[in-house]
Amino acid sequence: MTVYFIGAGPGDPELITVKGQRLIRSCPVILFAGSLVPEAVLSGHRAMRVVNTAELDLDAIVALLQDAHANGQDVARVHSGDPSLYGAIGEQIRRLNALAIPYEIVPGVTAAAASAATLGCELTLPGISQTVILTRYATRTSMPDGEQLADLARHRATMAIHLGVRHIERIVGDLLPHYGADCPVAVVFRASWPDEEKVLGTLADIAAKVQSKGIERTALIVVGRVLDAEGFADSSLYRKA
């Protein structure tokens, strides 16, 4: 018996990996994060038990995993995006290790990748940014020393900020001294979902634009000069020389 932590991708059911889809369709038990994973991702499953864990605490989830283990049943534990990023799988893994229950992680398409796709851009461009910082805005979960947004902004790299759109004004305040008021910003709401929405602007006006749309959750903030790359040099990869 194995617990498979499966990245369901950002929302579009077709963005799950072939392996993830195969496991969902073959595992007899499915536990999925229903607040972020659309049920369409589970299409074609033949599971005997399907549980939406959105309202369950860690103890209740682990109890379900223990029960499946006792019955020799593989579990598809389905998380949104890629489970290694803000997926809260670390605490589940520690419990599984203590219980000697085997597990495997199946990666998924990240919200950052889906947002770049819908924005039609490359997140790393020669001479502009060769680094992408994936981070979050600290509210209930504190940030380690050196990882405050203002600290990371000093690098002026492309930045993808999770879980922070409700605090867009504070985020802009942290970024402005380092990126400049004219730096392009995009806020992508529910990337790859049918109701996806994107708001484009600069650090000077993005907060007002986002607030006028009423976007307060489930959105990724992408910041960086790569969002307006017209006129910059090509890479050396496809040069004739």
Image (spheres, rainbow, N blue to C red):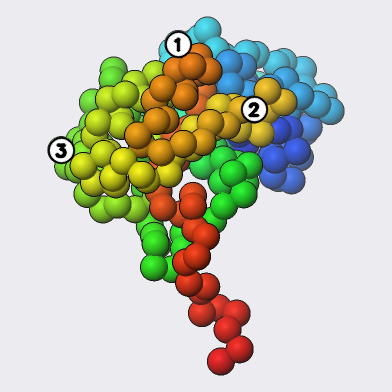
In the rendered structure, which amino acid carries the disc numbered 2? Glu
- Residue highlighted by disc 1: 57
In the rendered structure, which amino acid carries the disc numbered 3? Asp
Q: Residue at x 70, y 16 (%)?
A: 50
Measured along the vertical axis of the image, is residue 3 above or below residue 233? above
Report the mark closest to the observer, 3 or 2: 2
47 vs 128, left or right, is right
Q: CA distance from mark 1 to mark 3?
A: 29 Å
In the rendered structure, which amino acid carries the disc numbered 1? Asp
Q: Say whether marks 2 and 1 touch (CB < 8 Å).
A: no
Q: Pick whichever of labels 2 and 1 is earlier in the sequence.
A: 1
- Residue highlighted by disc 3: 145
- Quadrant for residue 160, please give it: top left
Label 1 crowd bin: few (<14), some (14–19), many (20+), radius 10 Å: few
Q: Pick whichever of labels 3 and 2 is earlier in the sequence.
A: 3
Q: Say whether marks 1 and 3 touch (CB < 8 Å).
A: no
Q: Pick whichever of labels 1 and 3 is earlier in the sequence.
A: 1
Report the mark closest to the observer, 2 or 1: 2
Residue 196: image tag: 2
- Quadrant for residue 206, please give it: top left
Q: Residue at x 65, y 14 (%)?
A: 51
